[in-house]
């Protein structure tokens, strides 16, 4: 009885739209009957499945780089900043969340432009005579994503670090382990679940994001959300867009299952 | 007691449902509800009409006909009164049964440039469903302080190695495919599937020379900030609005020609406010309305009416006097059937994915 509202909510806002999209992707509105042609098109057209490969490559890189940057950042916040200043430090860390996502992406475009701050600084060092092509590249997309997701991961990893019982570290020190060994054998394994949850969130949010690659990538390659939007823009091809969205959803589901299984194995 | 409670609950549910419907609807029937492109959202255009008719114009912006039709599909019949639409897509709206024939005798059709009335698209079965309100060119936009304007008189320059990495391409497949067709000497109205391999070759060469393929804001920003010096598919809609801040931005109609874009206004057949919808269309087509629309803060474009009340500086920026020559050398948007349209979009996707 208690789960009824949640069940109804799920049915109304997840199951029903999902079924509608699945039917739409099979061209159920067409007089020719149900067909899997939209799915076939994805798997047989190199430009289409290339979008999925691009998405996985970009998202994979974003997730790894974000974890590598966020972990030390979270560690400094949790371990090196005095407790009374931690709240302020966290507040400052999440400042980028306060600005509009679109505005932030356009700002990055200007920062990375030929005459932008980054290129100007590089030219002044004398190491470069020509400005680098930074804006409108995959690198720009990754920078835009990482800037956002490092903050998200920092929060999840920080929470994991703060939940660690300090007696584990003391016990390790008492048993003769140095700081590096303590980190590798005690702290890191215990915070991995937090890292994995943050990494999974990063993966899911990045792979479905349209704004960042569209603004910063310069359309020099297409990612899945851009390919989906293309079908809707002028032609209004909702069946193909639905099929592509469901394929993307399947990939996210596989990533979730892999993540959940891994966490389960870790716990046993 | 129980019956009273049930009936009270029913009344509350009905009230909630009605409130929900009212909230979901774009506005009340007394207002005018318009599905528009961003140039119609300019208060300088809307306010005089609202003040003169004591009415509120509720606008909803969209990009792309498919997205516009999707909004209509998700609305109740009668929610919308007027729609801005690519002139070539008017027949798609008519086929869906969305549009109301417009009374030609109540519209200033005689004031329009004959080349932009586009009766082939705006009229279906002899009835007028759309009226062209604004037009322009997808051609070559450039920064004349960085590019030799003489080079911009030929599309071949876009493939020249000396402009490698200095070009942006406007991200809309129809006009740019049209430009590629002009480059190989094809007429946009006669394109068939057999032309696509040659068009693809031109597109891939353009892409190899380009730095980015961007939608309106991105390509405009790239040209304005000096990230690129040339915009393929650009025209007065990019350069005119920025002319005051950056007078070096200009456009050319090369010897191969340009692609004529044109947007129309249409009235919904389910509109509950048809008189006011017609008044709005008449206002936009009036000399004052045309001038305000042409110089909208979102993007400038040529007014469809020759009588638009533009001042001299605005006419100069829009190159008003050169229009007869530009129009003579322009060809309409490709208007492919659904099958060819799909193939063109796939070709565009392939071009975007090519490194």
Image (cartoon, coloured by chain):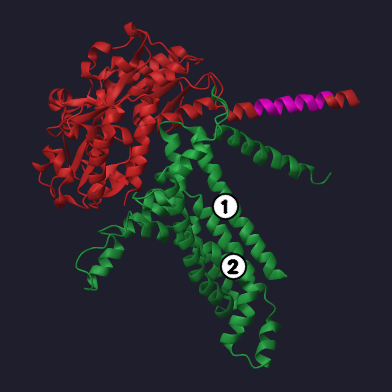
Is label 2 in a helix, a strand or a loop? helix
Task: Return the x and y of residue B88 as percentages of the image width and height.
Answer: 33, 23
Residue A69 in view of the camera: yes
Is label 1 in a helix, a strand or a loop? helix
Judging by the rendered image, the residue that carries numbered circle 1 is A252
Q: Name the side, left or right, on which B27 lies relative to B230.
A: right
Q: Residue at x 28, y 34 (%)?
A: B196
Q: Residue at x 54, y 25 (%)?
A: A30
- The Cα–Cα distance between marks 2 and 1, rounded to whole angstroms, is 17 Å
Q: Nearer the viewer, mark 2 or mark 1?
A: 1
Q: Is residue A231 above or below residue B109?
A: below
Task: Return the x and y of residue A253 as percentages of the image width and height.
Answer: 60, 52
Task: Return the x and y of residue B265 as percentages of the image width and height.
Answer: 37, 20
Of A161 and B208, nearer the camera is: B208
Density class for disc 1 (Cα within 10 Å; few <14, some 14-19, many ≥20) is: some
Chain name for mark 2: A
In the rendered view of the protein, which quadrant contains the N terminus of chain B?
top right
Q: Name the side, left or right, on which B137 lies relative to A103.
A: left
- Taken as a whole, is the magenta stretch helix, strand or loop? helix
Density class for disc 2 (Cα within 10 Å; few <14, some 14-19, many ≥20) is: many
> Where are the magenta residues, as a range?
B7-19
Q: Is residue B107 above or below residue A165?
A: above
Q: Are marks 2 and 1 on the same chain?
A: yes
Q: Residue at x 52, y 33 (%)?
A: A239
Judging by the rendered image, the residue that carries numbered circle 2 is A195
């Amino acid at each position: 009885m208690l789960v009824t509202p949640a069940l109804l909510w799920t049915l109304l806002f997840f199951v029903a739209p999902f079924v509608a999209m699945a039917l739409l992707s099979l061209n159920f509105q067409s007089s020719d009957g149900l067909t899997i042609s939209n799915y076939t098109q994805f798997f047989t057209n190199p430009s289409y499945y290339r979008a999925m490969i691009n998405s996985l490559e970009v998202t994979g890189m974003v997730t790894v780089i974000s974890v590598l940057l966020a972990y030390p950042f979270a560690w400094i916040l949790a371990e090196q900043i005095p407790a009374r200043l931690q709240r302020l430090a966290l507040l400052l860390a999440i400042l980028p969340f306060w600005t509009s996502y679109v505005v932030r992406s356009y700002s990055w475009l200007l920062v990375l432009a030929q005459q932008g701050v980054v290129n100007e600084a590089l030219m002044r060092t004398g190491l470069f005579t020509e400005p680098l092509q930074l804006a409108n590249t995959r690198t720009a997309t990754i920078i835009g994503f990482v800037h956002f997701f490092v903050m998200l991961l920092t929060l999840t990893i920080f929470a994991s670090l703060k939940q660690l019982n300090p007696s584990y570290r003391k016990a390790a020190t008492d048993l003769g382990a140095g700081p590096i060994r303590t980190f590798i054998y005690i702290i890191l394994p215990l915070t991995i679940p937090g890292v994995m949850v943050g990494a999974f969130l990063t993966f899911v949010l990045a792979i479905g994001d349209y704004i960042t690659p569209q603004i910063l990538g310069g359309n020099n390659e297409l990612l899945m959300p851009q390919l989906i939007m293309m079908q809707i823009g002028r032609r209004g091809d909702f069946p193909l867009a639905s099929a592509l969205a469901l394929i993307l959803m399947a990939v996210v589901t596989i990533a979730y299952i892999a993540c959940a299984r891994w966490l389960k194995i870790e716990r046993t | 007691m129980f019956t009273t409670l049930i009936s009270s609950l029913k009344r509350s549910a009905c009230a909630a449902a009605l409130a929900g419907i009212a909230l979901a609807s774009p506005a009340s029937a007394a207002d005018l509800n318009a599905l528009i492109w961003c140039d119609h959202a300019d208060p300088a255009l809307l306010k005089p009409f609202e003040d003169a008719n004591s009415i509120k114009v509720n606008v909803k912006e969209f990009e792309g006909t498919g997205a516009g039709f999707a909004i209509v599909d998700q609305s109740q019949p009668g929610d919308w009164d007027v729609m801005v639409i690519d002139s070539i897509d008017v027949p798609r709206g008519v086929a869906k049964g969305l549009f109301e024939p417009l009374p030609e005798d109540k519209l200033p059709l005689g004031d329009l440039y004959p080349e932009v009335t586009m009766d082939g698209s705006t009229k279906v079965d002899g009835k007028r469903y759309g009226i062209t309100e604004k037009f322009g060119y997808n051609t070559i936009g450039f920064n004349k302080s960085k590019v030799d304007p003489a080079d911009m008189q030929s599309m071949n320059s876009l493939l020249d190695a000396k402009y490698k990495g200095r070009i942006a391409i406007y991200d809309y497949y129809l006009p740019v495919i049209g430009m590629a067709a002009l480059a190989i000497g094809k007429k946009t109205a006669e394109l068939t599937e057999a032309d696509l391999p040659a068009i693809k070759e031109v597109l891939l060469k353009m892409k190899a020379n380009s730095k980015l393929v961007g939608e309106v804001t991105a390509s405009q920003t790239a040209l304005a900030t000096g990230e690129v010096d040339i915009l393929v598919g650009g025209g007065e809609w990019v350069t005119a609005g920025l002319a005051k801040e950056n007078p070096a931005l200009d456009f050319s109609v090369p010897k191969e020609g340009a692609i004529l874009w044109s947007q129309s206004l249409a009235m919904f057949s389910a509109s509950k406010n048809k008189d006011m919808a017609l008044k709005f269309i008449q206002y936009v087509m009036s000399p004052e309305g045309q001038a305000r629309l042409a110089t909208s803060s979102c993007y400038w474009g040529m007014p469809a009416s020759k009588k638009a009340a533009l001042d001299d500086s605005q006419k100069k920026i829009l190159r008003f006097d050169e229009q007869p020559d530009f129009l003579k050398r322009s060809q309409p948007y490709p208007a492919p059937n659904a099958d060819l349209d799909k193939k063109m979009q796939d070709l565009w996707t392939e071009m975007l994915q090519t490194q």
